[in-house]
Amino acid sequence: MVERMIEFVVRLDNHPGALSSLTDVLGDAGINIEAMSAWGANGNGVVRLITDNETTTRHVLAEAGLVNTEHRVLTAHLSDEPGSLARVTRELAEAGVNIEALYVLRSSADGIEFAIAVDDPDSVPEDLPVVGGFGQS
């Protein structure tokens, strides 16, 4: 498992070059993108990303005037077998925790590591196999 992570959610116009502008400013600052998902609808784009340097990312996004929010995300390293993700999502639902986003960080023979953005990380049950909730690293 990994330590606590911060996810940046960046809002962009959905047009050719918008995503390139974001990735250019991050790359020019030497920031490595560790995980990302992006989509567009109705002229708007949303990019969720995790980088190797939260402080520099925060500064670069502000300097570039890119509208963004930050969220603490949980990480879960699960075995690559049917039902392992279902167990985690079910336990979060039963605890009243809403999943706002979920995406793959890494995949290997040892399993799959997910980033999970939730509405209330501190409400995650302590016995759940995730990192980043209340009382967890």
Image (tube, rainbow, N blue to C red):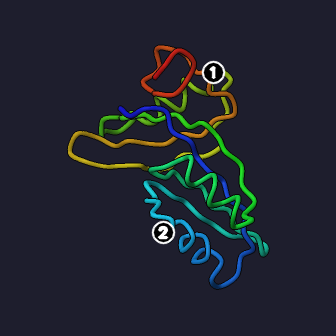
Which residue appears at 38% of the width and 41% of the height? 113
Residue farthest to the left, as pictured: 109
In terms of image quadrants, where is residue 80? top left
Name the image quarter holding the N terminus: top left
Residue named by callout 1:
122
Instruction: Give above or below for 37 relative to 125.
Output: below
Using the image, tell me which numbered label, if any, was put on residue 19.
none
In terms of image quadrants, where is residue 95? top right
Front-lying residue, 41 or 91: 41
Which residue appears at 63% of the width and 66% of the height? 39
Q: Amino acid at mark 2?
A: Gly
Residue named by callout 2:
27
What whole-number distance in Å separates the C-alpha atoms at marks 1 and 2?
A: 32 Å
Which residue appears at 71% of the width and 76% of the height? 14
Q: Position of residue 15 (x, y in %)?
A: 70, 82
Q: Amino acid at mark 1?
A: Asp
Residue 96 is left or right of residue 6, and the answer is: right
Front-lying residue, 98 or 45: 45
Residue 104 is left or right of residue 57, and the answer is: left
Answer yes or no: do the residues labelled 1 and 2 have beta carbons within 8 Å? Answer: no
In terms of image quadrants, where is residue 93? top right
Density class for disc 2 (Cα within 10 Å; few <14, some 14-19, many ≥20) is: few
Q: Earlier in the sequence, mark 1 or mark 2?
A: 2
Front-lying residue, 15 or 54: 54
